[in-house]
Image (spheres, coloured by chain):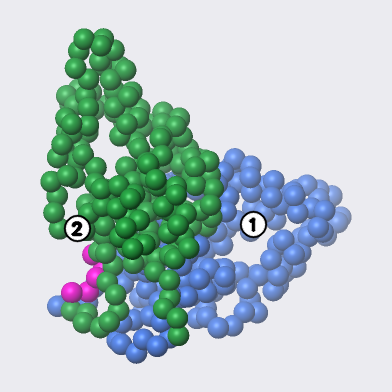
Chain colours: A green, B blue
Amino acid sequence: MPTPRKTIAIDMDEVIADALSEHLLRYNRDFHPDPTTTPLTRADLHGRWLWDAVPPARLPDLERYMLSEDFFRVLPVMPDAQRVLRRLQSRYDIFIASAAMEVPSSFTAKYDWLAEHFPFIPTSHIVFCGDKSILRADFLIDDNPRQLRLFESSNDPNDTTAQPHREGILYTSPANVKLTGFRRVNNWLDVETLFLP
Amino acid sequence: MPTPRKTIAIDMDEVIADALSEHLLRYNRDFHPDPTTTPLTRADLHGRWLWDAVPPARLPDLERYMLSEDFFRVLPVMPDAQRVLRRLQSRYDIFIASAAMEVPSSFTAKYDWLAEHFPFIPTSHIVFCGDKSILRADFLIDDNPRQLRLFESSNDPNDTTAQPHREGILYTSPANVKLTGFRRVNNWLDVETLFLP
């Protein structure tokens, strides 16, 4: 009997979509319009989330950017994501799984963004969810350690059968660089090497 | 060690939301406005989907109803669904899982409908998906046999361990009354008896 194909679930923001760049762009446009001031950069976010790197008074601005209708529609695609995902599809069942329930106003923009940049992913393989423990997949590639823990939470530590366990794979973002405990990929070339050796 | 809570995924249309009634209402309003003609009723749908019960020329109208902005926002709630789901939450992890990707214009209406009628379901436990094989749950309650088969497809027939298998449970709708091969519930009182004996 042939081995069944493994399933890989793939997060959107900071994994295939570069939301952080768009956030920094809008933030610096509003708060560092003068080129003589120092803008906020990725280097400032080493080991912390964007939300922890701006003055508390500006948190509503970060949220306002995300809630604007076009935010998730204009995000740049992560380098090599399209080419590698297309290759992965030949050997794995691929699902895109975004925690879109956290920003319900993003549904349509995210759907349209996927249709434009990843037309080879069938819409039946798109999942908008909240808690990623609901995903039945062998792997989840995500930048958010909370979601990776939820995804792995249904692994039974007493299960000694050959049934393979679910593995969360951490996609590097500035906020998670110091984190340990997960296999890590730094970019899509790493994903390619890991799954298509 | 306490037994981990089982997870139940619950479909929306025809399980907690009465989309068929709204479809019949709009259809009869447009095509049987005269009370002397015979309207289309649930009895006409015995063993067939609505799409197979109307003249082909009227299929675009059925689609038009679904694509209208308010369709999924005004659906009646299935009797006893709220009370029983609230009770189930005390013993099970409950996720609402709709194949909303088939009608992307429905995202916001479905989200708002759940917020109104099922405010006790956290938004993190809502899933908009396509192919329900992606759901990690012990049970899926759905009226659509295709989704139940997809959900059960990852069961390994050679697996003889105690690891419990995933079970699709068929929620009765006029279209599926003749179908066998799944445990069946006819209404939410049946669900209550099955899971909270």
Nearer to the camera, A163 or B70: A163
Q: Quadrant of the N terminus of chain B?
A: bottom left
Quarter of the image for residue B50 reads bottom right
Q: Is residue B170 magenta?
A: no
The residue located at (75%, 68%) in the rendering is: B44
Q: Is residue B117 left or right of residue B196?
A: right
Q: Is residue B157 above or below residue B146?
A: below
Residue A196: x %, y % from top left: 36, 62
Residue at the spot of label 2: A182
In the rendered image, residue B27, in percent from the top left (x then y), is placed at 74, 52
Depth check, front residue: A16 or A103:
A16
Where residue B21 is drawn, which disc sits there?
Answer: 1
Q: Tag 1: residue type?
A: Ser
Q: CA distance from mark 2 to mark 1?
A: 49 Å
Q: Residue at x 33, y 23 (%)?
A: A26
Q: Secondary structure at mark 1?
A: helix
Q: In the image, which residues are magenta?
A: A153-157
**Which residue appears farthest toward the right when viewing the image?**
B36
Question: Does A49 sit above or below residue A163?
Answer: above
For disc 1, the chain is B
